Every structure is written in C-alpha cells, then in structure tokens.
C-alpha cells in the first residue's frame, strides 16, 4: 500500500519485514521451525488483552516478506511452557463450549440447567 512505489518497481527487491515490530531493517527470514514455535506461543497472546502481540498473525508458511528480528523473536517466544499450557486449556474449553452450544441447539433434548451446573465448578 506504499504510495508511489509503482514508479520504481523492482521485482528483485522484496521487502522483508519483521512481523513483530513491522520494521524492515536487518530482518532475517523465518524458518518453518521458528514459525511453528511462534504459532505455539501465539495462543498465549490471544488471551492477553493488552498485549502488543495479540494482533500479530503468524503466517502458515515461510514467504518472501515474513521476517523477524532476533530480539523481537526472543521477546515473543519468551513465554513459559505453563503459560502456553494454560492458554491451550482455555482455548480448548472455549472450543468445547462452542461445540456444546452447537450440539445443544442441534438436539434440544437436554436441559440447559443441568449442563450449567456441570460446567460450573466451585473453587
Ligand atoms: Zn522486530
């Protein structure tokens, strides 16, 4: 979307940008392994409301403009295994709730009150 970039369009130059900070200086290209690691960690950021990283979408494949800074990558992936695990648990819970809601509307034979008591546990 850069303005006026069509005049000196050069197909040999691809702008490799850091997906974390959107800067294009000294950016390195991702490897598949690194992308996988980022995807693994990205679950945590989904549940962090005020994180600068929560809007970042980790691409599925390595492409010509998907890059990173070592510092940014380290910051992004600096999440504990436990945090990832609990985020995955939260996500699974949300998914099963959604499936629950779907199956409920599909077959409305079960009493919603019963289900409510089952899912709410006192701590
Ligand atoms: Zn960066």
Image: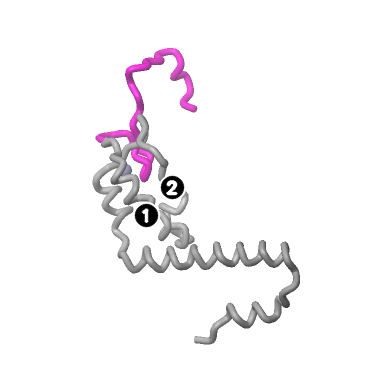
Q: Is residue 3 magenta?
A: yes
Q: Position of residue 42 (x, y in %)?
A: 40, 54
| Tag 2 residue | 56
Which quadrant of the structure image shows residue 114?
Answer: bottom right
Left or right, residue 23 beside residue 123: left
Q: Residues within 10 Å of mark 2 (few under 14, many from 20)?
A: some
Q: Compare residues 116 and 104 and report the one nearer the observer.
A: 104
The stretch of residues the image draws in magenta is 1-26
Q: Nearer the viewer, mark 1 or mark 2?
A: 1
Image: 51 above or below 28:
below
Left or right, residue 28 beside residue 113: left
Q: Position of residue 26 (x, y in %)?
A: 25, 35
Mark 2: which secondary structure? loop
Q: Is residue 70 magenta?
A: no
Mark 1 and mark 2 lie on one chain; the one further toward the N terminus is 1
Image: 19 above or below 13:
below
Which quadrant of the structure image shows residue 12?
Answer: top left
Image: 98 above or below 113:
above
The residue depicted at 47 percent of the width and 62 percent of the height is 47
Q: Position of residue 106 (x, y in %)?
A: 72, 62
Residue with the most extreme right position: 108
The residue depicted at 75 percent of the width and 69 percent of the height is 108
Q: Compare residues 84 and 21 and report the one nearer the observer.
A: 84
Left or right, residue 71 beside residue 19: left
Q: Residues within 10 Å of mark 1 (few under 14, many from 20)?
A: some
Mark 1: which secondary structure? helix
The residue depicted at 37 percent of the width and 15 percent of the height is 10
Image: 122 above or below 99:
below
| Tag 1 residue | 40
Q: Compare residues 117 and 64 and report the one nearer the observer.
A: 117
Q: Compare residues 61 and 108 and report the one nearer the observer.
A: 108
The residue depicted at 41 percent of the width and 52 percent of the height is 53
């Amino acid at each position: 979307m850069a303005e006026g970039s069509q005049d000196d369009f050069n197909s040999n130059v691809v702008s490799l940008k850091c997906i974390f900070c959107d800067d294009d200086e000294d950016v390195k290209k991702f490897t598949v392994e690194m992308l996988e690691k980022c995807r693994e960690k990205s679950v945590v950021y989904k549940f962090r409301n005020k994180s600068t990283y929560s809007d970042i979408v980790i691409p599925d494949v390595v492409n010509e403009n998907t890059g990173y800074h070592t510092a940014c990558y380290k910051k992004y992936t600096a999440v504990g295994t436990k945090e990832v695990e609990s985020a995955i648990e939260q996500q699974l819970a949300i998914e099963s709730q959604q499936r629950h809601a779907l199956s409920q509307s599909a077959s409305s034979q079960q009493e919603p009150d019963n289900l409510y008591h089952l899912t709410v546990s006192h701590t």
